Amino acid sequence: MSRNNVIAGKGRYAYILTDAAFKVVVCTPENEDLLIEILELLLPGKHIASIDFVNKEMHGLVIEEKSSNFDLLCTEKDTGEKFLVEVQNRPHDSYRDRMLYYATFPLREQMTEKIKKLREELEKHPDGTGTTNNDKMDYSLRPVYVLSLVNFELEHENEDALEQEYISRYGVRNEKNGERFNGTLNFVFLEMGRLKLGPDDKDKCRNLLEKFIFSMKYMHEMEQRPDGFDDPLLVHLYTATELATMTVIQRQNYDKVMTTEIDRMCEISYAKKQGVEEGKEESARAMLADGMNKSLVAKYTGLTLEKIAAL
């Protein structure tokens, strides 16, 4: 089965290794319990009662700065903690800087809300007679967690940066002794690309985390949930991604983002092919300029004699 057929919905389970697909399949109110289980897997010790889904556009610092559409920004209802979740299948330049930039939006949003509230109170009590220190700015911030599920490896100074072989965490700390500055800004990367198992190696998964990563990477190629993958989180994951049981709206949204993904993959494939051809032509030109005969140029570049003659 070709990859395009798989991600287009020809298999039993959805392909959720892109941020858009993960959003429309997993990050829905219907699958709130599944998302909470994933968050708690990556944030051990944190118990999340419930979450609000806030899929919205965040505007830039200036008018010329484009807006950012978050794949998921959710809020813990009891504590107000923010969780920004992203899934990426391929590495990007300056990926950590990108995540840091994204984290500024929920932080700025908190301060914007506080400033708005302060202004409203000052308008009601311009003489400062309010009952809640209305003339004082509250700079306290609720924690923000940026969770990235990436199907590649981040670069680290050494392997000590990793937990359970796959997870790297970052916060703001003192460089000398590791003292925590505060708990506001938190980054968690699940580096799924570090799992060096193929689609037939399900029996080699040693724990829940590896089974979760394995499922994220390969379940779109499966016809059923593997034996032994019976943790509630995994059961929920396979149930949520089963194409046949999706609602009509959910399936329509999934098909839409997958069509976009396939188009993008075709564009990338075409661009790579064009780049290879252009590279061959440049090499051929250099060989011809050095006096190499056309037959040898054709042999070493793979170009036809007609193409070489045209060059």
Image (cartoon, rainbow, N blue to C red):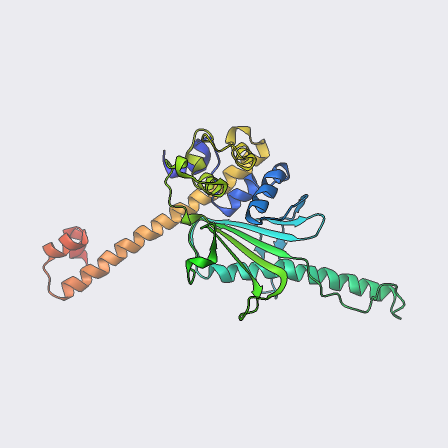
Quadrant position of the C terminus in the picture = bottom left
Image location of residue 7, percent across then percent down: 44, 38
- Quadrant of residue 250 in the image? top right
Residue extending furthest toward the front: 177
Q: Position of residue 62 (x, y in %)?
A: 61, 66
Quadrant in the rendering for residue 116:
bottom right
Q: Nearer the viewer, residue 63 or 85?
A: 85
Q: Quadrant of the N terminus?
A: top left
Residue 186 in sight: yes
Q: Position of residue 255 (x, y in %)?
A: 50, 37
Which residue is at the front of the view, 54 or 251? 54
Residue that appears at 36% across and 40% down: 198
As drawn, is 54 to the left or to the right of 238?
A: right
Q: From what the image shows, is residue 118 above or below residue 262? A: below
Q: Is residue 144 above or below residue 3?
A: below
Residue 138: horizontal and vertical position, in percent? 75, 65
Question: From the viewer's perspective, is 103 left or right of 212?
Answer: right
Residue drawn where x is 88% and y is 66% of the image: 125
Count the marks: how many? 0
